[in-house]
Image (cartoon, rainbow, N blue to C red):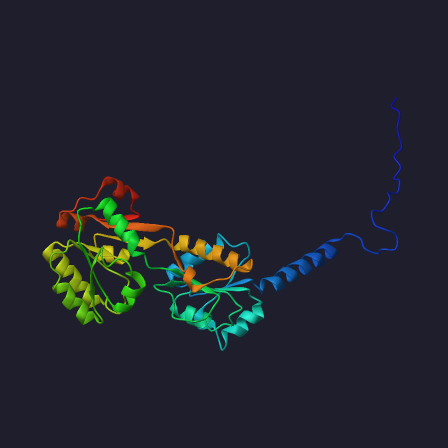
Amino acid sequence: MYKTTSIHNHPQPSPYKEGWDIKPSSGWLGLLFVVIMLSLANTSWCAEIIILGDTQLKPVAEVIAGIRKTVHSSPKIIAPADVKGSFSKTVAAEDAKVVIALGKEAVEKALQLPSNIPVICSLVIAPPKSTRPNFTCGLMATPVSEYLNFIRQYFPVFKKVAVVSSPEIQRSMLTGFQGQLAVHQADTSFEFISKIRQLNGVDALLLLPDVSVLTSTALDEVYLHSFRHKVPVFGVSEKHVKQGSLFALVFDTQSIGRQLGEKAIEALSGADLAPSQSFTARKFNVYLNTDTAQKMGVVIPDELLRRAKKVYP
């Protein structure tokens, strides 16, 4: 015989205080979820940081990726073409504390903001001419010092390097380097081509990011002169290396993006920004053209081949 035991359902004390008519249910939890999501959605409309830039452009998208890896909050991204009317109204509506402007058009719009809004710009060759306080720039141009150090380390055979550029670029990039470079001035692409043809006794030609003289026709003349006279060209971009430059040092987009993010964090903490604090990328990528090296009789060190981001045969 088995002994049976009766089981009684004893009422359990409610976890809720008396007088509260709230009990867990799928409907109540669903309502709570909706309230939370609406709250999050409302806060997402505002951002401490606004990035003004065209994400359809690859460099802009890559710089933004670097910014995102650094800042703690999610920045709001606006294309310059989408700014209708006063950009300051957009910034005020977002209650933004810092603006990062990428590219010439974006920088022009951002510099019109009230000076209490810190502006950090990038993807420009030189700092904009502005008396506005509370802004700084991350420059996309590779400093001439980087090229000179690179040449000394990997191509010491090039003792005399020439530069042909406009006065404006010379003022912004060549101050202090006249003794180390053979500097020639050209105001137009026509003058640039003429000066290139007159170059004598130089070992190489260093191009600078000078859109006023570096037209497609001018570059064609540069490479004709280069291969005809066995004078290597040091380019500005990966595209230049594809066209025939021996090498180029190109700023790393994500690296400059991370630096922009760091500057934004400093500005949010109350640090003052100044044009004199303009900076360049910490990292530069090397692009090489081994076919050009062979035709010029230039030996590229194995270490440099390993270091290069891309080598064009």
- How many marks are shown on the rendered structure? 0
Q: Residue at x 23, y 45 (%)?
A: 154
Q: Residue at x 55, y 65 (%)?
A: 96
Choose between 222 and 37: the one closer to the eye: 222
Q: Is residue 24 visible?
A: yes
Q: Give x and y (percent) for residue 55.
A: 42, 63
Q: Give x and y (percent) for residue 138.
A: 40, 59
Q: Residue at x 14, y 50 (%)?
A: 296
Q: Give x and y (percent) for residue 262.
A: 48, 54
Q: Is residue 311 visible?
A: no
- Picture quadrant of residue 10: top right
- Asked whether, in this view, residue 227 is left or right of residue 35, the answer is left
Choose between 209 and 143: the one closer to the eye: 143
- Picture quadrant of residue 108: bottom left
Q: Give x and y (percent) for residue 213.
A: 23, 68
- Asked whether, in this view, residue 35 is left or right of residue 19, the answer is left
